């Protein structure tokens, strides 16, 4: 019989992680570093590098493509800290049937909350928040209806014209999902529920505790600097 008492303990999760490419390995430091302040530092560093094109080639490569994609991972973790509900393929039934496209509208309670910036919360600076949500939920998100266009004059001009019928409706989020018949409806319903919760969180979270809003304002300041 072999005595294993003196054998070093191994962590299966760690071993599995070592087999992954660097960009997919878990970075434990992000648990502490995922703050708006740290993301701001990364974005400012990136902006500084952009002032010296083709000078720090390797640094730019590490920042953009190397493991572990620090900016993208910090932004994603900050978003998830705010309560984002991801949709994993393991939560869905096996794919079967034809690939279909399903859509549903999530109406935004603007009349009940006329001063709240729902569109800003949904889209984020340069659409970054919406892109993260699309990635998490496996769907496409479009803001439609009255008040969905930044240029109000253009919105008034287009209202009633062909292909602009949505401007006659109340402000809403159009959620689109493309998937197999066996799972499209489930994915769509999950996305609708997640977006509804996302909007409700913005209304009930005090501004000084709204991590998402703090991150959005910080990113906007860096982008406009």
Image (cartoon, rainbow, N blue to C red):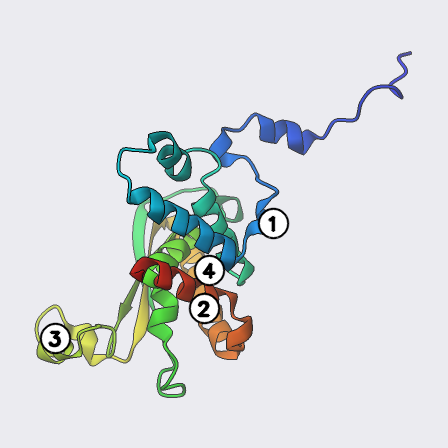
**How many neighbours does mark 1 have within 10 angstroms: few (below 14), some (14-19), or many (20 or more)?**
few
Q: Which mark is residue 31?
A: 1
Query: What's the residue at 30%, 33% (across, down)?
Result: 55
Q: Nearer the viewer, mark 3 or mark 2?
A: 2
Indicate the position of residue 209 as horizontal and vertical percent values. 56, 72
Query: What is the CA distance from the residue labelled 1 to the residue labelled 3?
Result: 44 Å
Query: What's the residue at 37%, 39% (across, down)?
Result: 64
Mark with earlier residue (4, 3): 3
Is there any visible trace of residue 125 in the rendered image? yes
Indicate the position of residue 213 as horizontal and vertical percent values. 45, 68
Query: What is the CA distance from the residue labelled 3 to the residue labelled 2?
Result: 28 Å
Q: Which mark is residue 213?
A: 2
Mark with earlier residue (2, 1): 1
Query: What's the residue at 34%, 48% (across, down)?
Result: 47
> Would you identify the image quadrant in which residue 52 lies?
top left
Dot 1 lies on which element? helix
- According to the picture, the residue beneath numbered tag 3 turns out to be 154
Query: What is the CA distance from the residue labelled 1 to the residue labelled 4?
Result: 26 Å
In the rendered view, does 152 fall on the left or right side of 71? left
Indicate the position of residue 16 as horizontal and vertical percent values. 61, 29
Q: Closest to the observer: 54 or 157?
A: 54
In the rendered view, does 23 fall on the left or right side of 221? right
Indicate the position of residue 161 as horizontal and vertical percent values. 8, 74
Dot 4 lies on which element? helix
**How many neighbours does mark 3 have within 10 angstroms: few (below 14), some (14-19), or many (20 or more)?**
few
Q: Nearer the viewer, mark 1 or mark 3?
A: 1
- According to the picture, the residue beneath numbered tag 4 turns out to be 190
Q: Is residue 59 above or below residue 161?
A: above
Q: Are marks 3 and 2 in contact (CB under 8 Å)?
A: no
Query: What is the CA distance from the residue labelled 2 to the residue labelled 1?
Result: 19 Å
**How many neighbours does mark 4 have within 10 angstroms: few (below 14), some (14-19), or many (20 or more)?**
some
Query: What is the CA distance from the residue labelled 4 to the residue labelled 3?
Result: 34 Å
């Amino acid at each position: 019989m072999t005595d294993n008492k003196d054998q070093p303990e191994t962590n299966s999760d760690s071993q599995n992680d070592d087999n992954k490419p660097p960009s997919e390995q878990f970075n434990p430091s992000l648990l502490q570093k995922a703050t708006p302040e740290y993301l701001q530092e990364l974005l400012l560093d990136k902006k500084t590098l952009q002032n010296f094109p083709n000078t720090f080639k390797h640094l730019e490569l590490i920042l953009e493509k190397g493991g572990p994609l620090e900016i993208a991972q910090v932004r994603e973790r900050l978003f998830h800290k705010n309560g984002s509900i991801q949709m994993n393929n393991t939560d869905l039934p096996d794919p079967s049937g034809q690939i279909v496209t399903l859509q549903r509208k999530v109406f935004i309670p603007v009349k009940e909350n006329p001063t709240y910036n729902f569109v800003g919360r949904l889209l984020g600076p340069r659409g970054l928040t919406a892109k993260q949500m699309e990635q998490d939920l496996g769907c496409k998100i479009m803001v439609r209806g009255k008040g969905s266009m930044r240029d109000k004059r253009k919105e008034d001009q287009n209202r009633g014209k062909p292909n602009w019928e949505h401007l006659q409706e109340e402000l809403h989020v159009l959620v689109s999902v493309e998937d197999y018949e066996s799972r499209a409806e489930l994915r769509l319903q999950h996305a609708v529920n997640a977006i509804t919760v996302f909007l409700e969180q913005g209304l009930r979270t005090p501004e000084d505790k709204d991590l998402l809003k703090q991150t959005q304002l910080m990113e906007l300041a860096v982008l406009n600097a």
